[in-house]
Image: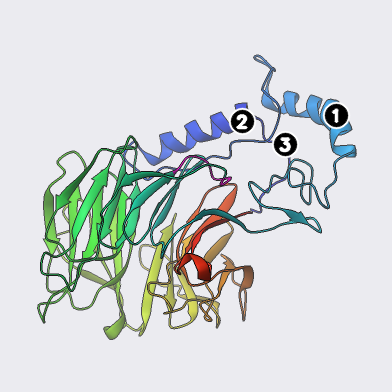
Amino acid sequence: MSRSHRLFTPRAATLAALLGAASAGCSALLAIADVGYGAPDAGGDAGLDEELAAREGGEDAAFCKDADVVADPLNCGACRHDCLGGACTGGLCQPYLIAVANHPRGIGVDGAEIYFATDREVLHHSTRAGSEVPKSLAANQSEPEGLAITLRGIYWTTNEYFIATGGSLSFATRQGQSSVLVSPAPASFFVEARGGAVFWNLRAQGDGGDSIMWIHEDGGTEAGALRGLGSTFGLAMDDERTYWTEPSKGIIHYCDRPACAMARTLLSSEPGARAITVRGSRLYWVRGFTLKSCTLPACADETTLASQGFGTTTPEPGKIAVDDDYVYGSGTDGATLVRCSVAGCGGNPEVVATANQPFDIALDDAGVYWSSFAAPDAGGGIFGKAK
């Protein structure tokens, strides 16, 4: 269902957030609710439908009649459609800079707040509008890459593949108390958290094969590993399984949680399968430069959503993200952020924004956010765009 431009009151936003949290579970990755654009809720116990009807038929109707939907960033394209921090041009919200950053990598959203990693630091930005200076949660990191947010805090992997000390899985509270949980652990780009478990890819040093590692949030120490898996890439989790790809063999694997005792094969004819994500009962992945999808758990209806122009290897990892309407990823040129409808987009996907080397992507109800893996003078930074 496409994003509605109907007035969304703070009261409705609160209700949506509570319902989303209840269905996802306390340890699930946080669902992000729209903060709403209306005036403070003064409707008392009146039903939401009645309140909306009254507002849209009265004071809001008068307001919207005079709104400049062509150039006003608070009413862009439709009354009360907020561009967050971007300009409004011709009724379309434009991309905007949230924070300048040197070779930024992982990114995540939590309410109105943005978390992201640069080449040496994990930072917190208190507003997605990009109007404040980011706060450092953990400094002196070595290439922090993957990033996952839970109710407990922020997890990330550091990549020290070519350094004798190896990498690590680390954690910080939202107040900035950080610690190393597992080290050495030469980690890759991917870390995911769901249902009280945190998973990440561990890169092999030598010919021993990669590993899928995990910890329990309540314990905070290594709980298990699947070793000798070959070259792993990508990572995704739903309520029951963890998924990853093995590009060199064209395999999409999974394990059943909570034990994750065995690597199982979901699909075995996907050469070049790399980035992967899941939403609801649908699995999405990039194979070469095509976008594909199937229905879980059997994945018997494999479908091509975009036949070209989706995904890149410049830079790795070319991550993807999905909401109810679109799958977002990097364009093949490595210089654009693109999207494709979850129902399919035929040939080339739609260009969302010019983006120098998109590395990671995060979504909430209001916008799409990404890290551009470049030096500041070459367009490196954290960017956003309203949906």
Which residue is at 18% across, 60% downward? 213
**Secondary element at tag 3:** loop
Q: Residue at the location (71% across, 27% down)?
A: 39
Q: Earlier in the sequence, mark 3 or mark 1?
A: 3
Residue on which the image places disc 2? 12
Name the N-terminal-most of marks 1 and 2. 2
- Reading the image, the residue beneath label 1 is 57
Task: Please state if 52 lies on the left or on the right of 139 as rendered.
Answer: right
The residue that mark 3 highlights is: 7
User: Mark 3 to mark 1: distance in Å?
Assistant: 12 Å
Inspect the image, locate mark 2, and give the three-letter code of the amino acid beneath it: Ala
Q: Position of residue 15 (x, y in %)?
A: 55, 29
Q: Position of residue 106 (x, y in %)?
A: 38, 59
Q: Which residue type carries mark 3?
A: Leu
Q: Does the magenta segment cover residue 369? A: no
Viewer-nearest residue: 6 or 102 = 102
Q: Position of residue 377 (x, y in %)?
A: 51, 68
* CA separation in Å, label 2 and label 3: 10 Å
- Which quarter of the figure has residue 29? top left
Under circle 1, the secondary element is helix
Viewer-proximal residue, 127 or 345? 127
For the residues labelled 1 and 2, say whether their Cβ atoms are less than 8 Å apart. Answer: no
